[in-house]
Amino acid sequence: MVRRRSLIAQLGLVEVLALLAFPAAGSAFAGVPIALTATGPVPAVQTVSTVTYPLWINQDTVTHTVAFANGRCTVQVAPDATAGCPEGFSNGAGDYAYTVDGTAQASVVVQLAGRTVTLGARTHKIAGGARLHGQLSSFVPLPSPGPASPVTVLARPDRMHPFRRIAVVKPKIDHSKGSFGELRWHLRVRPQARTIYIAEANTQPQTWQQAWSKPFRARIGR
């Protein structure tokens, strides 16, 4: 029996690693494992991000029921099976308590997913206009731009003035960069004087951490 349970655990781990490495087509989400055992869930507190989700793996010989206190979801997991909440946890960060079979206390801690945004141009000297460009990245591949991808470009003439929004740009997929591609954006600008640009990535509702690019200083020249 011990050997059989060990094999089940190994198979479950392989399945989770496959999900992490190869998300389903059209989805940027990946499973984070929680083992269901005879003594309760392991770990009892699991941390995920808003672009991942908890995946319960039943390593016991009986069916277990996972039920969230706030009614978010209830799932039954048969022996040797896996299951997750259909809606996921992409709507926001928080601490979500649940029980297993109405007794074992556990929780899922959801954190905002991290990402980065870049901004640059071919040269800092601009004669008549320039094409700003950048990339929006996260540790989970994004198969489509979706609602989480707008990039806001801001500008100011110098450090004595506040940044002001000049455009909101929707990145597009560059399919030449791997199987999932990369989200890239660009914007044509025509500064009238020396200008400092910066890009911001933010979303409502808050699914991702707010991200800022490094400032890019452009000046009129030939």
Image (spheres, rainbow, N blue to C red):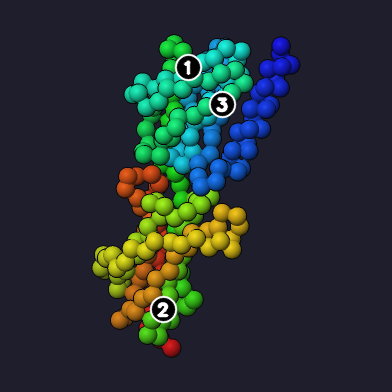
Choose the circle earlier in sequence order: 3 or 1. 1
Choose the circle earlier in sequence order: 3 or 2. 3
Q: What residue is at 34 percent from the left and 79 percent from the top?
A: 190
Could you tell me which secondary element the residue under label 1 belongs to? Answer: strand
Q: Position of residue 216 (x, y in %)?
A: 41, 69
The answer to whether residue 194 shows anywhere in this view is no
Q: Amino acid at mark 1?
A: Thr
What is the CA distance from the residue labelled 3 to the residue labelled 1?
A: 12 Å
Give the number of callouts: 3
Kindly give the residue lying farthest to the right in the view shown. 3
Residue 27, above or below 10: below
Q: Residue 65 shows which numbered tag?
A: 1
Where is residue 78, by image quadrant? Answer: top right
Q: Amino acid at mark 2?
A: Ala
Q: What residue is at 30 percent from the left and 73 percent from the top?
A: 157
In this image, 61 relative to 187: left or right? right
Query: Which residue, given by chain and number where applicable, does mark 2 sit on?
Result: 130
Residue 125, above or below 71: below
Within 10 angstroms of label 1, few (less than 14), some, or many (20 or more) residues? some
Q: Quadrant of the N terminus?
A: top right
Residue 96, above or below 188: above
Query: Which residue, given by chain and number where applicable, does mark 3 sit on?
Result: 82
